[in-house]
Image (cartoon, rainbow, N blue to C red):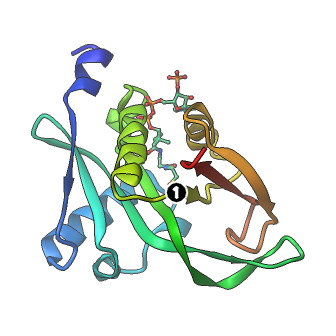
Amino acid sequence: MSERQIDQQANFHLVDTKKPEIQNVLFEIDKQTFRSADWFEKPSEYAEYSDVHLIFVGHRIAGSMAFEHDIDIERKANGTLGDDYVRTTGTLYIVNTAILPEFQRKGIGKKAKEWQIAHAKEQGFTRIVTYPRKSNAAIVGLNRKFGFEIVMEIPAGEWYDEEPALCMELDLAK
Ligand SMILES: CC(C)(COP(=O)(O)OP(=O)(O)OC[C@H]1O[C@@H](n2cnc3c(N)ncnc32)[C@H](O)[C@@H]1OP(=O)(O)O)[C@@H](O)C(=O)NCCC(=O)NCCS
């Protein structure tokens, strides 16, 4: 199947994160896509998130993505992050976007990003925010392609222990 055919088959389904079998699927995807430092401690942590979607290519699971509504990380005046999340009306926070290794670099990430932006607009959000690792060229490049801007660099030790994070935002009101 060509890249074009694969990305055309990508589709997105909201899942019920209260179900243990769904939590296990999401946890398994995380284990296959992220380094262990970025895994949740246990599958049941997914129950705290209500806007979570599985990505399918045809009938095969190709990845997942999770969002939180009206939330951001507290930003201090001195340009560092606080320890808490703060209620930020109008902001869609991308918790993660995970494409399984065998499906990567086939255009599904681009399809997912398009979908995320449409999802945010449909629900009336005015801003999308996400905090990738600075070294994650794939997601930083993908976000940039869709107009996300780097608004802040967060020093190592604050968000990720070993390396800086970038705060990337897309202003949907522009
Ligand atoms: C980041 C990720 C979502 C991208 O999804 P993907 O389906 O592989 O991406 P696509 O094939 O749609 O590529 C889209 C663009 O992303 C960028 N990109 C993707 N993989 C890349 C890589 N390995 N290196 C540099 N840029 C890359 C490119 O800009 C690419 O556009 P191009 O093909 O025109 O060069 C995927 O690689 C992934 O899930 N990685 C592991 C988990 C992760 O790090 N998630 C993000 C943090 S939550």
Q: Is residue 120 left or right of residue 157?
A: left
- Furthest toward the right, the residue is 78
Q: How many marks?
A: 1
Residue marked by disc 1: 126
Residue at x 43% of width, y 45% of height: 117
Quadrant containing the C terminus in the rendered view: top right
**Spot occupied by residue 2 in the image (x, y as percentages of width and height):** 27, 13
Q: Quadrant of residue 162?
A: bottom right
Residue at x 55% of width, y 35% of height: 146
**Spot occupied by residue 7 in the image (x, y as percentages of width and height):** 29, 26
- Between 99 and 35, the residue placed more toward the observer is 99
- Local packing at callout 1 (Cα closer than 10 Å; few below 14, some 14-19, many 20+) is some
Q: Amino acid at mark 1?
A: Thr
- Between 35 and 124, the residue placed more toward the observer is 124
**Spot occupied by residue 115 in the image (x, y as percentages of width and height):** 35, 42
Q: Name above or below for residue 104 compared with residue 132.
A: above
Ligand 1 within 8 Å, label 1 CB:
no
Residue at x 75% of width, y 54% of height: 151
Q: Quadrant of residue 104?
A: top left
Q: Name above or below for residue 45 compared with residue 28.
A: below
Quadrant containing the N terminus in the rendered view: top left
Q: Name above or below for residue 159 compared with residue 131.
A: below
Q: Is residue 146 left or right of residue 118?
A: right
Q: Secondary structure at mark 1?
A: loop
Residue at x 42% of width, y 70% of height: 69
Q: Is residue 107 left or right of residue 172?
A: left
- Furthest toward the bottom, the residue is 84
Q: Is residue 128 left or right of residue 45?
A: right
Q: Name above or below for residue 72 compared with residue 108.
A: below
